[in-house]
Amino acid sequence: MSAPTEKVIRQRAQHVLEWAEDCIHLVVAALLVLLAVLLTIGVIGDIVAAIRGPYNEQAIALSALDNSLVLFIVAELLHTVRLTIRTQVLDAEPFLVVGMIAGVRKLLIITAESEKTFQWRVQGVELVILTGLIITMAAAVYVWRRRSPVTDSGPQLEVPHT
């Protein structure tokens, strides 16, 4: 094959792969929207069922908090996918934020569930590890913001399309 033919084949292959990547991003975005709708319906249903049935403040609060934070995580992931589709650039910061939200969610749930039956060997170690992870991710976000070039959507890491 001649050099121009190889170049054309590579360009076509790259365009097909970019199109496939965009399609995958759109499917992921659609699934995240569907998940958000289902989570919202679930949160409302849980609250209504808890109010109708035997009233348990702690169960209502835990369920609403847990599902609301999961919904927040889904919203952040959807935001990340949207930015990736729009800018064709991978931004690591939203993933760190999602990780922090997930860590805080688990930290709050463990704390609320173990209020009366706290044991250092089980919940205490998990709380210490989660706290360390959250602090590490917060430090990573801080370092990421200080070291990365800032654009209109935040610091970004370009992923070359080859």
Image (cartoon, rainbow, N blue to C red):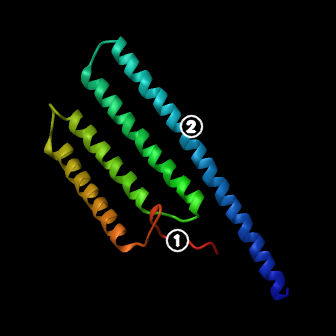
Q: Give me the residue at 58% from left, 48% from top.
A: 28
Badge 2 or badge 1: first in the primary sequence:
2
Q: Residue placed at 36% from the left, 67% from the top?
A: 145
Q: Residues within 10 Å of mark 2 (few under 14, many from 20)?
A: few
In the image, residue 114 sits, relative to residue 88, either above or below, namely above
Q: Which residue is mark 2?
A: 34
Image quarter of residue 20: bottom right
Determine whether the residue tagged by mark 1 lies in a helix, strand or loop. loop
Position of the N terminus by quadrant: bottom right
Q: Quadrant of residue 70?
A: top left
Q: Position of residue 79 (x, y in %)?
A: 49, 50
Task: Say left or right for 94 vs 59.
Answer: right
The residue under the point 57% across, 62% down is: 87
Q: Amino acid at mark 2?
A: Leu
Residues at circles 2 and 1 in contact by the CB criterion of under 8 Å: no
Query: Could you tell me which residue is drawn at 26 percent across and 44 percent down?
Result: 107
Which residue is more in the foreground, 140 or 53? 140
Residue type at numbered disc 1: Glu
Label 1: few (<14), some (14–19) or many (≥20) C-alpha neighbours in 10 Å: few
Q: Quadrant of the C terminus?
A: bottom right
When asked about the image quadrant of residue 105, the answer is: top left
Q: Which residue has dot 1 on it?
A: 158
The residue lying furthest to the bottom in this view is 2
Image height of 69 relative to 52, above or below: below
Q: Position of residue 137 (x, y in %)?
A: 31, 60
Depicted 63 relative to depicted 152: above or below: above
**Residue 129 in the image: above or below residue 162:** above
> Judging from the image, what secondary structure is the residue with disc 2 in?
helix
Q: Nearer the viewer, mark 2 or mark 1?
A: 1
Q: Mark number for residue 81?
A: none
Q: Alpha carbon of mark 2 to alpha carbon of mark 1: how far?
A: 29 Å
